[in-house]
Amino acid sequence: MNYQKMLKAYYANCELNLPIEEINHRYFRFDVLGRFVKIKKSIKDNEELARILYRYAPTNAYYSVSKWLSPGEVEPTYKAKSIIQSMFLGSDIAFDIDFKPFSIENIERARIETVKLIDFLEQKEIKIKYIAFSGGKGFHVLCKDPNRYLHEHPLERERAAKRYRMLLVDDVAKENIEIDTSVTIDTRRIIRIPGTINAKTGYICRVLEENEILNSASEIIKNTPRVKQSTLATVWDEVQLRCIRIISKRAVRSRVSPAPFYLTTFLSNTVIGPKDRCVPFFVYNRRLEKVERELLELQSTYTLGNIYVLSSENSTFAFSIDSLPLRRMEKILKASSSSGINKLLKYKQLFMRIEQEEDKDGKILKEKPKLVKILFAESKHIQSAGHAQFLKDYYGISVEGNLHGNSEYKIIPSVIKI
């Protein structure tokens, strides 16, 4: 039987009893033989998910930790082009505990850390929804967020949820419990669907029975179903597990405290609507008096309209709302001493900080950039309706003229690891 037929056979008979609340607000993503497929429609229940799993027969299958108004529209924060792609409703809290490489010893180590985490969560009175063996190197613990985020704007709700998770991660670290901190903090994280195959090992990602986490790793693996030869890489048999156990004794993973984080919000220069259009952004780690002459020269050379200049600490941010082709923006940026050309080439967009930077305790590390000057000039270009709306919303500046694109702009609340 070939690989695809094995997957089909498994998903034809598997019974899903998922401990996932409000499944219709979850985002689903499948790895189908190395090609990622996003499920555009909202899935209403377990039965419909089972039918879709059979139809696609994914190598690996994931669902979103968070709930979204339009889950099929959700994008990573740096890609989201409209508010509908970021309509955050709430989120579970996910913990991922595993250690490389795949071995009995490392799974046992992950199990011990998971037990410590469970004790911590019980002391914090954080309700655990389920504990799952990932089918790979460790365990997932999914919890109910004890908070309600009532902010009117969905991005502010998401930002508040991230801030709480940062505090929680910090408390976990103080207890010397090893987790993957990035999984817990990330509200747009996807995690393996219980009942689906982990293609690297062939084992099923399985929700554990009550107190089963207290059993040894060997016992947990023994009781976990496995689809033989259902992996594109290596099929792990008992001989290989014994070999890996010997190798893993030589590998030592040091205990490292998690890096500090801070929260802030960025504005994207992408013009929403037209393809491959953006507005000029300039970011300098210098004061305005050091860069004003350059901005005026760029404005004159490339016939840019008004340039709006922001200042925060010793940094200067500047932008116009002229809508330009991406290639034109690359040329302008290369002619400047502004940072960001590599990001523009890689992501096809730039980001500019528009809010304060604050740590997990809400302490402000850097103030919100302030509008300090406008370099006036008549624009020779069409202008971004979305960025004109941003000027009105943030600074009360109304722009009239030849506007195009949607009157939406993309802002991105972010957790930055220092």
Image: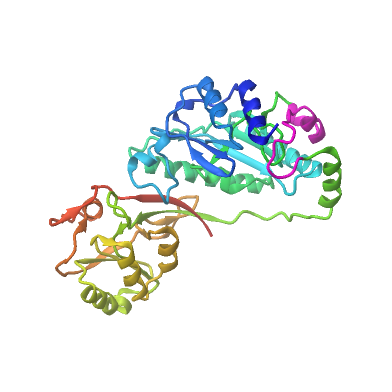
Q: In the visual, does 34 lie left or right of 256?
A: left
Q: Looking at the image, which is closer to me, 257 or 51? A: 51
Colour treatment of the image: rainbow
Residue 385: percent from the left, percent from the top?
Answer: 21, 52
* Residue 319 among magenta residues: no
Main secondary-structure element of the magenta-colored stretch: loop
Q: Is residue 154 visible?
A: no
Q: Is residue 214 magenta?
A: yes
Q: How many marks?
A: 0
Residue 221 shows in the view: yes
Examine the rendered structure and indicate whether residue 374 appears above or below residue 54: below
Quadrant for residue 365, please give it: bottom left
Residue appearing at x 54%, y 43% in the figure: 35
Residue 266, compared with residue 374, is above or below; it is: above
Q: Which residue is farthest front?
A: 1
Instruction: State which region is magenta.
Output: 212-235
Residue 190 percent across, percent down from the top left: 54, 40
In the image, 1 versus 217, the foreground residue is 1
Q: Is residue 283 left or right of residue 67?
A: left
In the rendered structure, the answer to whether residue 26 lies left or right of residue 238 reads left
In the image, what residue occupies the spot 59% across and 41% down? 33
Residue 333: x and y in percent read 35, 71
State the quadrant of the N terminus: top right
Quadrant in which the C terminus appears: bottom right
**How far across and down, in percent of the image, does residue 211 sit?**
73, 26
